[in-house]
Image (cartoon, grey):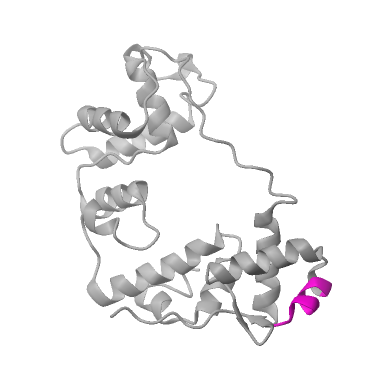
Amino acid sequence: WMERFPTPAACASAPTEDVLRLWNGLGYNSRALRLQAAAALVAENGWPEDPEGLIDLPGVGPYTAAAVACQSFGHQVPTIDTNHRRVISRWVGTPLDGRELEETAFGLLPVGLAEDWNQALMDLGAGPCAKDPDCAACPVEEWCADPTIYRPPPSQGRFAGSSREARGAVLRAVLDRRGTADDLAERIGLPRQRLDAALSALTAEGLIAEKGGVYGPPARRPAPA
């Protein structure tokens, strides 16, 4: 991916078909479209440097905006993820989320050390302060109010047999070769009901295009005005 698209301009100017093909296996396919749209804006206008500007880019949420602002541009903001939520909740002894978690994180953030602090909390949450904590190995055990506190994120459904699996299979087939619904059903081996649902969803998301009953890759994304 990085060899093919070393700069935002390279991604922005590429055929969307190529972007989707190379993105295969890197995450939700809709993210590739948003990434290319964001790349086009950055190529045209330059990088926003604060969280407020970054979050306006397509596909960028609060965590990504904070992480890029902190790690690339030195903004003193917490990059709150699942690890931060778990560690901070245990430190203060209360399950935190949303605005309360954000305010607590900002209150704990050491002045001038945001990047180091964010990385330290991520490492702590991935290590001794994981779902099942190893308090004996924790270097800051004395700071912790309640190591038993843990509110797991919502679990995702099984991939096998899911609509996500069907959509992925259909998209790969369409990128490999255009075809009608009948042709795709034969090539992929999906039941027609699941195939039709996947085709409808992919078309609505702009991941594929239909013309005269033939499904193919989407057109190149227009450059931003």
Residue located at (52% from left, 29% from top): 152
The secondary structure that dominates the magenta segment is: helix
| Most distant residue in the bottom direction | 212
Q: Which of the two residues, 139 or 50, is positioned nearer the viewer here?
A: 50
212 with respect to 4 (left or right):
right
Magenta span of residues: 178-186
Query: Visible in this render: residue 139?
Result: no
Residue located at (29% from left, 60% from top): 56
Residue 100 location, x and y as percent? 29, 28
Q: Which of the two residues, 46 or 181, is positioned nearer the viewer here?
A: 181
Residue 110 location, x and y as percent? 20, 31
The C terminus: image quadrant: bottom left
Q: Establish if 191 lies above or below 123.
A: below
Residue located at (37% from left, 30% from top): 97
Residue 131 location, x and y as percent? 53, 25
Q: Is residue 184 magenta?
A: yes
Q: Is residue 206 magenta?
A: no
Residue 188 location, x and y as percent? 79, 69
Q: Which of the two residues, 38 or 189, is positioned nearer the viewer here?
A: 189
